[in-house]
Amino acid sequence: MARDYYGTLGVSKNATDQEIKRAYRKLAREHHPDVNPDESAQKRFQEISAAYEVLSDPEKRRIVDLGGDPLEPGGGGAGGFGGAGFGGGLGDVFEAFFGGGAGGSRGPRGRVQPGADSLLRTRLTLEECARGVTKTVTVDTAILCDACTGSGTHGDSKPVRCETCGGAGEVQSVQRSFLGQVMTSRPCPTCRGVGETIPDPCRKCGGDGRVRARREITVKVPAGVGNGMRIRLAAQGEVGPGGGPAGDLYVEVLEQQHEVFVRDGDDLHCTIRVPMVDAALGTAVTVDTILDGPIEITVDPGTQPGSVSVLRGHGMPKLRSGTRGDLHAHLEVVVPTRIDHKQTKLLEDLRRHSDRERVEVVTTGSQNSGGLFSRLRDAFSAR
């Protein structure tokens, strides 16, 4: 199964190169052997380094996004010495000069090979992510040929030994070079390295043992999934050559944007616009939540702009847990831009009776200042 390199670094699948680099540096400082000699930290450091190596390489990252693992042999990437620029490894280098690789002839490869993993994406609303849903998805993959059941032969015919390579799966040739006579080996062009041919192939699959087909699969999406998460369906991917075992199918969730709520992990955020008078006198606002229906949020008298009302346990379900995140209601106090004569008179009367509140310039040393500059001051002083 492909490793979760994004999860190792704690970044999303849409993370930029800079975000990946920052996450790697932060984790590397915590788990570097010079800082943390613990054995588990050293193992974690190796995983972090491997994840950064993959995600910082555009080609390897593309393989990961397709559901593969570039660090696994046969995973499209750096299996063994392959990642160091040697293609299929040092064995191929020896094979190119001396034939058969460093350990002699490899022999024929099996005609039956395991299938590749498949990846598809499905769009879900925030409500579907919160409640969980059963989706029917359409998959276009290779499936077992029902005419030959994977054998690749027609009727009672059988594969026969390849006449070109004699069943070895490879052919050798001798060439002259500056090193003298050099024997090279390459896969047999007739049987493609299998060592046998099918004289009477299946009429439906042409001897491959599999055919492409479109089918529908039911996917159970658990409550609490989020954007970029993948659901694994074992043995639902591509059937391998020769009717080999199927790979896995990964269904990636694409969460659609909600018109009211913004999701941050397991928490939900919304913005409530409160008129100035209601913020001063206090009021109550009803919000139609995702899972709990209408909920009343109390706006206390004297509520200031930027205040946040937190409703514990009214956010998204936490995956594989019975708990839930929180709902954060951000209160935006609205000051009217156009008022009539009567409203103007009422506000002037209010101002005359508000002797203790006057316009003033807030000093940087004031403990009660809470504007933009005070927040900037606090941010710089915290460094």
Image: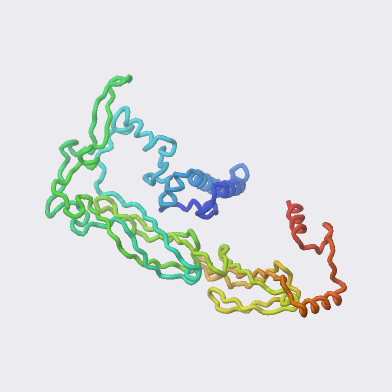
The number of numbered badges drawn on the structure is 0
Q: Position of residue 329 (x, y in %)?
A: 64, 70
Q: Is residue 383 shown left or right of residue 74?
A: right
Q: Is residue 39 visible?
A: no
- Residue at 39%, 56% (x, y): give it: 119
Between 373 and 33, the one nearer to me in the picture: 373
Between 293 and 50, the one nearer to me in the picture: 293
Q: Is residue 133 shown left or right of residue 52?
A: left
In terms of image quadrants, where is residue 137? bottom left
In terms of image quadrants, where is residue 60? top left
- Residue at 24%, 40% (x, y): give it: 193
Q: Position of residue 236 (x, y in %)?
A: 34, 59
In terms of image quadrants, where is residue 33? top right
Q: Position of residue 12 (x, y in %)?
A: 52, 55
**With respect to residue 225, does 197 lie above or below?**
above
Q: Is residue 272 shown left or right of residue 375?
A: left
- Residue at 60%, 67% (x, y): give it: 269
